[in-house]
Image (cartoon, rainbow, N blue to C red):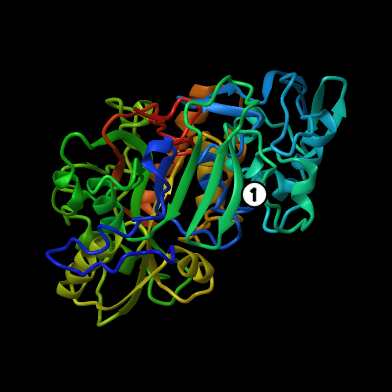
Amino acid sequence: MSRRLAVVLAVLGLALAGCFSGSGGDPAEGRLRVGLSFPPTSGLSPYGNEATLATRLGVTEPLVTLVGGTPTPALATAWTQVDPGTWRFTLRPGVTFHDGSPLTPDAVAGSLNRAAAATPVPRALASLAEAGAPLSARADGDGVVVTTPVPDPVLPQRLASPELVVLAPNAYADPTRPSPVRAGTGPFVLERVDGSTGASLAANPTHWRGPVAAPGVDARFLADGTARANALRAGELDVAEAIPVSQVPTITPPQRVVGVPLPRSVAVYLDQRSPVFADPGVRAAVRAAIGPVDVAGTIYEGRADAAAGLFGPATPWAVAPGARPPHAVTPPGPVAGQRIRLATYSDRAELPEIAAADADALRRAGFTVDVTVLESSAFEAQLGTGAFDAVIISRSQQLDTGDPVGYLASDFSCAGSYNQARYCDPATDALLATAGQSSDVEARRRAALEVEARVLAADALVPHVTERARVGVGGGVTGVAEDPDEQFLVTHETRRG
């Protein structure tokens, strides 16, 4: 927080309403004041979950962006598949990095090769790395040639990942933690990151899309959703992401909340390797206990959609009548006083509420439940360590590649890089492997729904809702991105009137 932060008393739920006073710059300057929900711990490095913070602030850009799941030109203007394992991307001419150096084929190839060699491997590239060799890139005339160890029909979608943005060579002074400070290509130049509290950005005068509407951005990272909503109401923020559902009714004109269906589900993932959930009957008992909890109607107050599976209204191909194949339902087994360690994170205000509601339902069913709520960075650090039996996560199906098969391989294959249920089934892996080689979009989607049915039949997770974006926008503010993939928020068109 700023040292000039005013002391604000917690009265009637309006705590921290003025927490941005004096820290957002003079409103007359026209600088955008933006509140983001996830405090960074690695300086907005693209190697991890912080990558989206930089793209949402308009700092970094990938070769390709996704529009409705379809790859669209960004830093690359065109691409062709040379052979099953090779693609060529033509680069946009005349682009410069924020440090003034040119976007060259060598610089692009260097960024991609460093990302492919990063530890851990970016999720968008995980399935390629598991094939035995990393992605590699080389300069080729006015473009780059990208080679994959196995045929990859969705490589352009992979390169839309925020973890695969292109940075200037000077960003890699620390190769394990590249810094986007004055190293991106987006409409805003990241000038400074103030630890986990904020960042200062200036307009990029040479952005390839044309003039940038706002002179700069003052960003604040604030995990408390109520504080973000209060600051928006007080006129101290122009844009505030992830407004808590409970705060939406309090946002009134001239402020507003923009909502859009997201390809993002909230579910309880049951660790099949934990002693309690190795038994499919116990997993089924959890599903029987918490499946009826009306999360959409109560906690989200109707501002989310009850989940029938992993995919929801943002992916209409999945919810079309007759699209989903039926799946087997395991009968619940005896609980016998089983103890469950249930965990989630506090950065999304609804998740702790869901944890409390689920814990109550599980206790009524006979379980003993210990609930842990952590900030996202601490939560992520403990994932996969065996510290928890079940975790509640909000997970995007299109964050990494926009490809449902890639998402499912990451989250539900035996070697999946984000397999929080530790679900492992050779038949599911075989389906994913076959679908992964297909360039037929419809075939990939059918396979995705078959895998979804297998995962649900195994009670690897219990879906609660598919979410909608809730972005708070100040009076007179225009040009805020309504992006269902949640990669972009502030753009070259965003301005305060």
Quarter residue 349 falls in: bottom left
In this view, the residue in front, 442 or 207, is: 207
Q: Is residue 332 left or right of residue 275?
A: left
Quarter residue 339 falls in: bottom left
In the rendered image, the vertical position of residue 352 relative to residue 38, given as above or below: below
Task: Judge the density around disc 1: few (<14), some (14-19), many (≥20) Cα neighbours within 10 Å.
Answer: many
Q: What residue is drawn where x is 55% and y is 63%?
A: 195
Q: What residue is drawn where x is 48% and y is 26%?
A: 213
In this view, the residue in front, 361 or 229, is: 229
Where in the figure is residue 216, as x and y percent of width and height?
51, 38
- Number of numbered discs on residues: 1
Report the amino acid beneath label 1: Pro
Work out whether residue 20 can be spotted: yes
In the rendered image, the vertical position of residue 491 relative to residue 127, given as above or below: above
Q: Quadrant of the N terminus?
A: bottom left
Q: What residue is drawn where x is 70% and y is 50%?
A: 130
State the SS at label 1: loop
Disc 1 target residue: 122
Where in the figure is residue 27, as x and y percent of width and height?
37, 41
Where in the figure is residue 18, as x and y percent of width and height?
28, 58
Q: Quadrant of the C terminus?
A: top left
Where in the figure is residue 100, as x and y percent of width and height?
75, 34
Work out whether residue 131 can be spotted: no
In this view, the residue in front, 27 or 47, is: 27
